Amino acid sequence: MAIPWLMALKVIPWGDVIEHAPSVLKAARKLMDRQPPQPLGQAGTPATTPVSAVPSLGELKNALIAAQGQIDRQAQTQRELTETLADLAEQNARLVSAVEMLRLRTRVLVWGGVAMLVWLVGLTWWG
């Protein structure tokens, strides 16, 4: 199971991911900033299909209240999705920096292992 992860780590162009992570985060923050804060209104009841050709004033009022409630719910959903997108962009940026740190540590560990191996070979060869 570790082999697919290692292959994925080798196949993913981490340089590109790291390069574009700040711009993704910036774009998500801009998208969040563009959303004006809107107070939540009353949730209306679903609009009913008018039976007569000309709806009454009460039916129009009920339909308007229902439509406003639906608009408010959709606006709230859009704000939540925008916040989720911003959170995901921030998590992606943190993940990319953590992966870069792990790559650096792995390089140091490999070079340390190579140095230790060379030292052991030299110790057994000349010692």
Image (cartoon, rainbow, N blue to C red):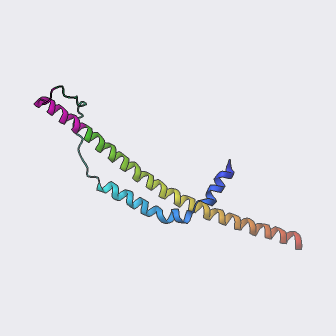
Residue at image location 40% in from the left, 48% down from the top: 84
Tell me: residue 47, above or below residue 105: above
Looking at the image, residue 69 sits to the left or right of residue 118; the answer is left
Residue 12 seen in the figure = yes
Check residue 68 for magenta coloring.
Answer: yes
To which quarter of the image does residue 109 belong? Answer: bottom right
Residue at image location 10% in from the left, 31% down from the top: 57
In which quadrant will I find the C terminus?
Answer: bottom right
Looking at the image, residue 26 sits to the left or right of residue 47; the answer is right
* Residue placed furthest toward the left: 57
Residue 127 seen in the figure = no
Image coords of residue 6 (percent x, y)? 66, 55
Residue at image location 66% in from the left, 66% down from the top: 108
Q: Which residues are magenta?
A: 52-69
Q: Main secondary structure of the magenta part?
A: helix
Check residue 79 for magenta coloring.
Answer: no
Image coords of residue 101 (percent x, y)? 57, 62
Tell me: residue 76, above or below residue 100: above
Image coords of residue 30 (percent x, y)? 34, 59
Residue at image location 44% in from the left, 52% down from the top: 88
Looking at the image, residue 84 sits to the left or right of residue 45; the answer is right
